[in-house]
Image: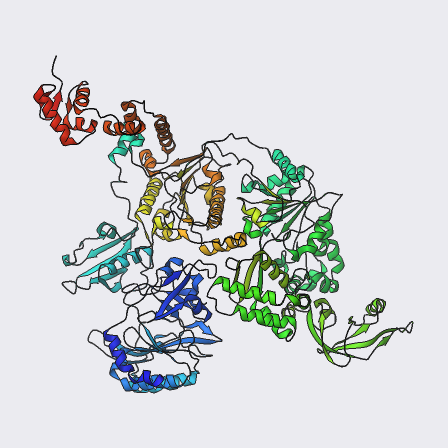
Amino acid sequence: MTTNVLQDIILRCHQRHEKPLKQQKTTSEPTLYKGLPYHYTVYCAHKYPVMLQDLETAGISFMPIGQAPGTDRPPRHFGGERFLKRQQVTDWDAIRLHRSWGIQVYTGMPSARNGAPWYDIEFKYEALRAAPDAVLACVQAFVDSVANPLLTITKSGGLRFSCRIPGYLHPNTNQERLYVFKQTPTAENPHQHETSIEILGDKGYNCWDARYEILLGDLLDPPVVAKEVFFASIDALRAKLHEPISQSIQQKDSTPDVPYSLGSCKLDLAKEAFLKRGFSYIRQADGLHYWRQRSGPIDNAEVSLWENKGGVWIRASTSDTGLPMEASLITDVWNDTGILPPIPATGLPIDDKVLTVREGKLSPLAIKRPLPVLHKPKPTEKNDETREEISDQIQRVFDRNVRVLGFTPKTDSEKNREVESLLQNSEVICLNVSGTELATEAELYFQKRNIGSVKRWRDRMFLWDQVKDIPIDERMATPFQRGNVCEDAKRCEALEKKGGDPSEIICPQCRVYTTCRERGYLSQPTTLQTAKAQIIEGRRLFLDPQYAKIVEQLLEAHDGAQRLCIINTTRENRLFLECELSKTTLEEWIANWQGDALGNFATVLLNALEIRNKSHDNFIKRLRTVIHTFEWLEEELIQQMCHVNVRGKVVARGITDTETGEDLARWTIEFEQGTSAYIPLDGAAADKLATQELPYFQLHTFVPNEDIKILMPIADAVRLGILDASTVENIQEFPTVCRNPNWTLWHQLKHFFTHYTRDADAPMRWENEVLQFWVVPVLHPSIRRLLVTAPVLNEHLRRTFLDEEIERLHPQPVAWVPGNHIFQIRTSIYPRRTIVDTNNTWDVFGISKTGQHIFWRIQAEVERDPNIKHGIIVHPHAIEQLKDIKSHENVCFLTIYRETEGLETAFQEAQVIWMVGMPEIVPRGILKRTQMLFGNDEEPLHYEMEPESYRYKDERVQSVYEITVLRIFTEIIELAKLNRLTNKKIMLITGFRIPEITDRPETLLFDWEDFDVAGGLDKLAEVIATRQRFEAERDKLTAESSRKKVETVLGCSPRQANRVLQKMRGGKLARIPFREQILTLLADGEKKTPEIVESIQGHPKAINTELTRLVNTGDIVKIKRGVYTLPEM
């Protein structure tokens, strides 16, 4: 087969050069993969479709590319840190994957496997044409040197040999990469050279799409070639073809015909506009980019492009290009670039009708408006609730034997106030917060209010970074004087990660053990039991059986009072327990428990995990089968997961009590590590051995003088010197065990598969050699009352605690400072695709016409009054074009959704905050949360989204999407402190309903027509009120209303008013003859023909005919052309 392929290879290369192949578009199907709703299949070569997940499994780092010509290149941001780690499906925007036409593969280390980097050796077509025999001999040598050669014809007719080379990384310098070339000097460029062979190794990348044809091999299984063999073949060809260039000549790195990026978003959009219109890139000089028309009438007709003062400018050198020869904004020349143009010098375009409405001469309903997608419900009676009343409500709920109560504080900053009211009602609480900052905030808050003893649980690493560099003797001399609670925290932390208990293994040997029990880490359980308020970090405390022992200590009843447990969280799905099982742990089990239940289990499970997954449900089904297969070994598996596997031999060597002469042991275990331990006869003998500090270990069954496996707790292994816990490094080499025998990894897997009975939507992933899965929380049995507080809560809380009695308490929202308003657009939700043009170019996204109108209005408002401070939140793809707006001194911040950390002060300073469009939520996150909450439903989940309405078809998925968006909006609006600060306005440019915001009386719904009529924010509330008044009048119109009334309210013509009345009266009216209608009109005085035609329903020609007839009969008089009146009586 190989010989046949190589026989006519030169001919095939010539044919390919003359007749190139075409790319094929990437396809997708709605099947789950890595938490994404799609599988992608890319054509990496001619008739060679490959699923992206298979590229990942093969260890290939890749990037999507666009369609030729022009965009068959990587995304702008393909370099930098992307060269440092493997790029996979989740590293790229789904839009690019959907719109891709192939991939580029990162060569070198990103695509390395087992320490062997990826290499592509490109034999250029010019080399094949110039020296076919020499090139073919080199290719033949490569092919013959391996069993699985990977040989490809390139799109231009060259050849590519791909492989991995262990332990070698070829440099990316120009001299080393262009491995074989010869000089081709010209008068213009005396140092020009022609490359014959190029080696792509370190920081390289190469194209794979349907224009390429794989002749031999499999892209997913390239050969591994030794460095010596590789260069032996290629150096022979180099000796024949290569002409070295003097090292003194400064060679410039080769660049593509068009740079991947010209340096800014706007310039890159301009670049796409030039390429679309048939221009070729020439060069860059002095900050200008020069272009030439490919089919221009003259060769030197250049067009220069540059960016300056917020605009992108072009200028043609001659008039032949059809472009202006004076510097002009590109947006004035071409209107489809996606570049945000500056506001016209004449100001924002305003319709004459808008001006008439603004002057009060016409009803605002005369302006044509899009239909609203958002409506306000009727206002409900509002009762301000005191904290004491809320506390009483909470108590009444728990008195009904409700175990879990969901509670939404009035504002996020008020959550500690609600807890304070509970404490003042003599409650004892245990407050569980998610981080150190929140714990510190709560502790200081309660201490300032003197509500009783407040104690905070601190883990061993508390303030460790501040004391770790102090010499240990100095720290031990004055322990816990610097705020830390442990003087050997790093070693304790390492032991906990391995499944050991530092309190049992490390602490008793510590020099400050006694002091620690008095005022250090070990004193905390006793101290916290007497506190009125306990504050503890880590949201899993009450919900994870791993911490059962700590919870029992903390919740021990004090004076007969049962503690109220409180969890502060941001979303319900964060209450689920994230579990992990790494490949490292599985391999450790395989090595340490070979031939035993745990070793066999780990082997089978790892094999199941590493099978390439064509579908998510098949993946889950395999793992479920593994668990089911090993269920009969459950007890043995649990035992082995909790113990260290120690090898040794039992020999007949005992010991006698020197005082009583009684035997304490008759047998001794000699461990493989060189230590030994007596086997005590009974418990009393064990106590005496311990008193005498002699090593012992209780072993009930054994066979003397034979090598045996001994299951041993990790604490005993350390005590007997089998494991050395003296340093962090030693501990890190320990085998990993499960600390809680009632919550091992086996229990977690069983808990998972018991809850999620369907395979298709179970929340489990195998990524980066770690099995991740989520299980529903397990509420500790000591907890009788649990209060869950979050900024936004809905029915998802019931999905989190399925078997518990649950209620939700939603107090009235806190009042805002009078005069503070939110203006929310009512006509569109504005997803990303309506603001950002994702279809105009392959790589860089422009601003759509809709987005342009929005940002123009924002900019105009910013510039209208420099004394009013603004803040702007937009989509990530839009922010780069808004830097000119940010340059205004009265713009406090310009950021994107989810990047508001550190802007708290700026939010408070801003008087107007613009929130533009819907936040972009990664589908992967939505799918994961949906699976956690609804993956156990009998009805399968569906993840498709309606592109027009921007709604998921499945209401369960939509509910997760909506509450995610709600939280983002709620948290951002909370930063504005509308309940504390004055003169604040928020412009919410999305019609997405946020119940806590949209339904408030201070929130006013508007459309852009309102904004245009108002001419700015100052009068927007007044304009909205006027429009609402007219809408109310419109709703009162009836069939009995006069036509004049209809005209006034709707701002319409008499004819349109007639149509409205006709519709109200149930369809067609009895037809009134033209004669009667004309005579009625003229009774008010003379009328012109257009007025008559406008007021009468009928065809204008028929009306003119009737006017002529009435003049002829003398019923009316024609005063002059087109003017009529009644005859004088």
Task: Give the residue drawn at x 80%, y 74%.
Answer: 678
Identity of the residue furthest to the right in this view: 660
Measured as percent of width and height from the top left, residue 90 is found at: 44, 61
**What colouring does the structure picture have?**
rainbow
Task: Give the residue drawn at x 48%, y 66%.
Answer: 613
Of residues 479 and 384, the one drawn nearer to the viewer in this rendering: 384
Task: Give the residue drawn at x 53%, y 67%.
Answer: 769
Residue 238 in view, yes or no: no
Of residues 459 and 173, the one drawn nearer to the viewer in this rendering: 459
Q: Give the quarter of the image for residue 53.
A: bottom left
Measured as percent of width and height from the top left, residue 789 is found at: 58, 44
Measured as percent of width and height from the top left, residue 395 is found at: 65, 38
Q: Give the quarter of the image for residue 362.
A: top left
Residue 336 in view, yes or no: yes
Question: Above or below — where is 600 with respect to 1046?
Answer: below
Identity of the residue furthest to the top in this view: 1129
- Quarter of the picture holding the C terminus: top left
Q: Give the quarter of the image for residue 102.
A: bottom left
Measured as percent of width and height from the top left, residue 1004 is found at: 41, 35
Question: Above or below — where is 940 with respect to 888?
Answer: below
- Quarter of the picture holding the N terminus: bottom left
Count of number-bearing discs: 0
